[in-house]
Image (cartoon, grey):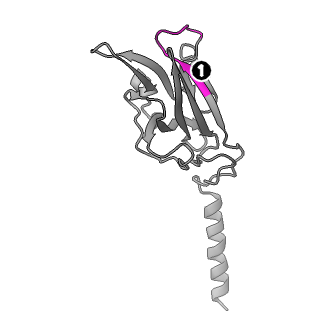
Amino acid sequence: MPQFPRLLGYLALGVIIACNDPNALGDPTEVNSVDTVTLGAIEGTPLSTPSGFNIATGALRIDSSVNFEFAYNVRRLSDGTYQRVFLPRAALGLGSTTTADPGLQVRTQTFDEIDHAPSNGYTADSAVPIEVGQRYVVRSRVVCSGLGVPLYGKLEILSFQDSTVTFKVLADLNCGFRDLLPGLPKN
């Protein structure tokens, strides 16, 4: 019988530790859904055309906000051909010195098969060439200040028209969650 109070003490200590765990996530509140976004190139489109993408809010103009994960551009190569690219913030000289930079990671699975975002392995400091049909996982800037974590999403390039790119995207707007399937995330 003397072991029972000790067992209760350990159980209570475990509950206290679990409740004070800074890595514990609350319940998700935002439903993951698929959207379609069109961006214009940084060069060659009107200034009023959004060229940047923010996981939480979508397309935005990069001349009026630096709160984007990547921008789109069409680069002229030395051989005279053109290359369409996404430019993460660090590739534009807007890197972070204290947190992980936003980036993209090319994936081979279909859009629907990409179900979870990895923590690492993102291209964050150089141009990412894009083509129709390619799929990527995207990591945002650290936007969840209480947890100090980024948001995650996935996208697939649907089409190019003149100097624009259209892609479908699913973003998990729940801080700390990396689930990339439609509906309420599980983790």
Residue shown at 51% from the left, 46% from the top: 117
Can residue 93 be seen here? Answer: no
- Residue 108 appears in which quarter of the rendering? top left
Q: Is residue 95 above or below residue 154?
A: above
Give the percent coordinates (x, y) of residue 172.
62, 42
Q: Is mark 1 on a helix, strand or loop?
A: strand
Is 63 or 104 nearer to us in this picture? 104
User: In the image, residue 137 lies at what x, y percent?
Assistant: 50, 40
The residue labelled by disc 1 is 60
Q: For residue 47: magenta?
A: yes
Residue furthest out toward the bottom: 1
Task: Return the x and y of residue 30 as percentages of the image width and height.
Answer: 70, 43
In front of the other: 139 or 44: 44
How far across and down, in percent of the image, does residue 35 sit?
A: 65, 33
- Asked if the stretch drawn in magenta spans residue 19, the answer is no
Question: Hey, which residue is sitting farthest right in the picture?
Answer: 29
Q: Which of the pair 22/111 is nearer the observer?
A: 111
Q: In which quarter of the image is the N terminus?
A: bottom right
Graded by Cα atoms within 10 Å as few (under 14), some (14 to 19) or many (20 or more), the crowding at tag 1 reads: many
Residue at 42% across, 24% down? 85
Residue farthest to the left, as pictured: 79
Look at the image and give the residue range highlighted in magenta: 37-48
